[in-house]
């Protein structure tokens, strides 16, 4: 279960990035522009529910999902999460090109919170499932983007965490890859997992989510049935 | 819910005093291990000599210092062959300098990880200090060879001192590294200043010269450098000489202060890392 209560997030954007001591001494204190990325956002994702976040660029979707993931501390409000989380904000976070494919499985898996022992036992199977057995010992940098995404997704699948946070991570890859992702997400939904989901693909949102939340300029504009919310989203002025 | 239903997380606005959450660190031990291992395996990738660099660093420094400072300048070495003398000093020093410079650059170097996943940020500088420790262990093995070569017999019992002393160096390096890595997020000047800082710090530490060379009236000031007391003890213990407990205690106190300062600076910046890097 995810419970977001009255969350606001204010970023302080320096007028000019003054990262050097010399300029700091010369010009004195920073001056900031404050930017309200989220304004008093509340939402609830019950356990077993798939909820999608919909909104234009800059509406605060990614900020919200990062607050839930614990990456940004909220400026106000609280977030409660019950159940272990798998934050998939980008496929292959922590991948390193000069390490072997097998080593990267271990690295990314642990970053996602999968126990090391599980990964050591499953690494070969993960690589095989991605169709990369022949390249298990190759440097990751020698693989194509598609191969890397397949590998990363294969690792992410092993995370049995029942709460998923997904930020457009699945927008990469070709049709076959996407179909596999969607099939996996369906399986997770049928199993009773929980997900908070950012995507710009209406078909995906409509097919997978029980409910959609529309964010606009950092605030919740509406929530409800996917079809209605997609209509609301389309009616928003930019 | 298949698993982890008992797992609760509450995220609140940060503020007030944060403290070191050791329970959380323990939960993330796998990540610490893997980050350390990643740093070790990346470091010597695409090098011809690979892990041998860990040994060569202090060994080559020893050769250079022995020729120029031991032979040509004739620096005293407390009655021990100068190569053994300088290697015993270089051992903790090389570890300290490597650990500090790697952890100092670590947060900025791992910006992508920080902005995409949550984990206790302190793992990043810690992994750097730990990865340098592996190099250090390798160069400790070489110490045995160096002492044998110069027919210097180690005192097995007193050599045990090296364990707590090495731990002390690790704690100091973690404190300094945390502080510098946090500062480096805001002021990239830090990564340019660190090599110079480490060089100065080395000359303030009896690595290539004995502490007995320092004039009496500067001794108090000298002892405030925690690496001074540690290095002297490092040299005394395996050769069976008495460890100067007084200056070692001063070193311990300074280590505690520097660690607390580094942690404080780190935690103050920690909340906004993801916003800034």
Image (cartoon, rainbow, N blue to C red):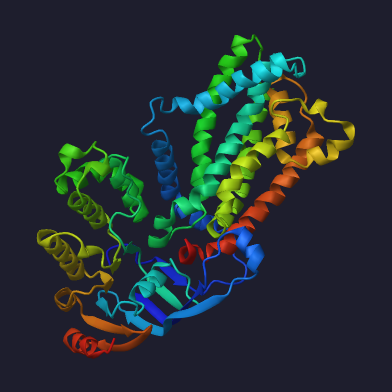
Nearer the observer, B157 or B72: B72
Residue A59 sits in which quadrant?
bottom left
Identified at 73% across, 42% down, the residue is B252
Locate residue B198, reporting x and y percent.
64, 40
Furthest residue toward right: B217
Identified at 18% across, 52% down, the residue is A146
Horizontal side of A176 relative to A16 (left or right) equals left
Locate residue B141, reporting x and y percent.
53, 22
**Number of callouts:** 0
Nearer the observer, B71 or B80: B71
Residue B199 higher or lower than A85, as above or below: above
Locate residue A214, reporting x and y percent.
28, 84
Query: In the rendered image, which quarter contains the N terminus of chain A?
Result: bottom left
Residue A65 higher or lower than A88, as above or below: below
Residue A156 higher or lower than B246, as above or below: below
Horizontal side of B37 relative to A89 (left or right) equals right
Identified at 32% across, 40% down, the residue is A98
Horizontal side of A187 relative to A108 (left or right) equals left
């Amino acid at each position: 279960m995810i419970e977001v209560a009255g969350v606001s997030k204010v970023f302080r954007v320096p007028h000019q990035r003054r990262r050097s001591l010399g300029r700091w001494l010369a010009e004195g204190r920073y001056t900031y522009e404050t930017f309200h990325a989220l304004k008093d956002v509340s939402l609830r994702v019950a356990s077993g529910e798939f909820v999608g976040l919909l909104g234009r660029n800059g509406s605060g979707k990614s900020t919200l999902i990062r607050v839930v993931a614990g990456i940004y501390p909220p400026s106000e409000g609280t977030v409660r999460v019950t159940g272990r989380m798998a934050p998939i904000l980008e496929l292959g976070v922590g991948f390193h090109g000069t390490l072997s494919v097998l080593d990267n499985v271990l690295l990314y898996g642990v970053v996602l919170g999968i126990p090391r022992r599980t990964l050591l036992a499953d690494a070969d199977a993960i690589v095989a499932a991605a169709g990369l057995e022949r390249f298990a010992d190759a440097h990751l940098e020698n693989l194509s983007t598609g191969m890397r995404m397949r590998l990363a997704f294969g690792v992410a699948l092993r995370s049995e965490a029942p709460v998923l946070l997904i930020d457009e991570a699945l927008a990469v890859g070709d049709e076959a890859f996407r179909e596999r992702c969607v099939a996996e997400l369906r399986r997770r939904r049928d199993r009773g997992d929980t997900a908070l989901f950012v995507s710009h693909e209406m078909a995906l949102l409509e097919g997978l989510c029980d409910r959609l939340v529309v964010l606009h300029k950092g605030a919740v504009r509406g929530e409800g049935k996917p079809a209605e919310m997609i209509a609301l989203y389309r009616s928003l002025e930019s | 819910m298949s698993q982890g239903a008992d797992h609760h997380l509450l995220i609140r606005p940060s503020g007030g005093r944060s403290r070191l959450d050791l329970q959380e660190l323990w939960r993330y031990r796998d990540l610490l291990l893997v980050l350390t291992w990643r740093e070790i395996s990346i470091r010597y990738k695409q090098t011809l000599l690979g892990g041998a660099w860990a040994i060569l660093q202090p060994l080559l420094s020893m050769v250079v210092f022995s020729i120029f400072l031991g032979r040509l300048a004739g620096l005293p070495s407390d009655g021990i062959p100068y190569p053994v003398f300088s290697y015993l000093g270089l051992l903790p020093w090389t570890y300290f300098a490597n650990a500090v410079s790697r952890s100092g650059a670590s947060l900025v170097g791992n910006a992508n990880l920080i902005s995409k996943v949550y984990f206790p940020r302190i793992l990043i500088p810690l992994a750097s200090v730990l990865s340098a420790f592996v190099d250090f262990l390798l160069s400790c093995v070489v110490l045995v060879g160096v002492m044998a070569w110069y027919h210097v017999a180690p005192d097995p019992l007193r050599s045990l001192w090296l364990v707590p002393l090495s731990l002390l160096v690790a704690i100091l390096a973690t404190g300094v590294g945390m502080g510098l890595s946090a500062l480096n997020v805001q002021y990239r000047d830090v990564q340019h200043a660190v090599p110079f800082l480490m060089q100065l710090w080395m000359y303030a530490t009896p690595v290539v010269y004995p502490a007995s060379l320092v004039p009496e009236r500067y001794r108090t000031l000298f002892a405030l450098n925690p690496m001074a007391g540690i290095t002297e003890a490092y040299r005394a213990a395996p050769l069976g000489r008495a460890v100067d407990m007084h200056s070692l205690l001063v070193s311990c106190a300074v280590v505690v202060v520097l660690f607390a300062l580094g942690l404080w600076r780190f935690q103050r910046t920690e909340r906004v890392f993801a916003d800034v890097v």
